Amino acid sequence: MEKVTIRDIARLAGVSKSTVSLVINNSARVDSATRRRVLAVIREHNYVPSATASALAKGRLPFIGMIVPGLTWRMVAPINFGVASVIERTPYEIILYTSTNDRDYGPVIERMLASGLSAGVVVISQDQAMKPLLDLHEHGVPVVLVNTLGSDFDLPSVEADNYEGAHGAVRHLLDLGHRRIASLAGPATYPCCQDRQRGYEDALSEAGVPLDPTLTPRSEFEPPKARELMRDLLGHPDRPTAVFAHNDVTAYAAMEAAADRGLRVPEDLSVVGFDDIPSSAHVKPALTTVSQPFEEMGAQAARMLLATISPGAEGQAAARVHLPTTLIVRDSTGPAPA
């Protein structure tokens, strides 16, 4: 069966192609009787109008593309909400592409270019080579990055202030009297982890606490590995009394390691995480953590993208934006044990 075209709909409804186009685009220039007749023919023949044609008839591309690493990532939902809260107030719609970090997302970029539907793209928390995104940008499709984990890049971006967040977390532990503070660090190649580790080290240095390399193992954001590393550290005679974990899930692993050693949180070990994912308020004890403003990060990225696509729109097309974090103090931190 051949695909039904707009020409076929016009012929069957007894109207011109331009009238069908006006009906599809919900124009007030078509009388109600004609509109009903055209829509009846469209339904009868299951005609699906071309999104590109409809958009071009309105003088614009219809979609804002979003590339996310996977819908199961805990921070994706609030970032998506932030993007949508801005985009839904515009004529654009969102088209979502998923690409996990363990799979080459080059084909995703190729599909975006081939479809020609996206006026711009927001890319969330990717850990892949930037070249495909730079190619997309050079083909005239503006790109804004959110919380991107990869190496240095030359694209507009929005991220949390990882350095200040880490610095404030460790300062909190120091104020509670802790001096043996471990750092469960994430991958050394991630700029966010570099900033968090630098914040940890600077806070210790400012307090006159010597940096002990044995207290800074790299968990690589892998909970089983983090749990084993913390078990080893907590088995030493001069064990840490506190730990700063570079994300919340490795903080959970640190609390499990403390339980494995028969230690209590926070009486024997204080634990601070980073991210403030929703479950952190509900673990026992509730996790003290650095909250990233995920919704605002998404909203800011959307405003930056719109400013690039349509100069004069809400927001500014800034090169790189760092949003402040907030330390959320809960039950997992307390005074250093005697």
Image (cartoon, rainbow, N blue to C red):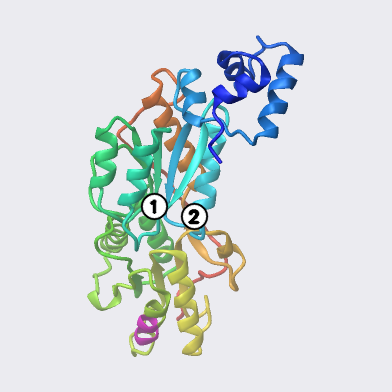
Dots 2, 1 in contact, CB < 8 A: yes
The crowding category of the residue bearing disc 2, from other C-alpha atoms within 10 Å (few below 14, some 14 to 19, many at least 20), is: many
Q: Quadrant of residue 44?
A: top right
Q: Which residues are magenta?
A: 228-233
Q: Residue drawn 34% across and 32% down?
A: 142
> Left of 71 or right of it: where is 240?
left
Magenta region, mostly helix, strand or loop?
helix
Q: Position of residue 217 (x, y in %)?
A: 29, 75
Is residue 189 visible to the viewer in this orientation of the structure? yes
The residues tagged by marks 2 and 1 sit, at their Cα atoms, a distance apart of: 9 Å
Decide: few, some or many residues near mark 1? Use Cα within 10 Å; few <14, some 14-19, many ≥20.
many
- Name the quadrant of the N terminus: top right
Q: Under tag 2, what secondary structure?
A: loop
Q: Which mark is residue 75?
A: 2
Q: Is residue 281 left or right of residue 126?
A: right
Q: Position of residue 282 (x, y in %)?
A: 62, 66
Residue under pointer 1: 125
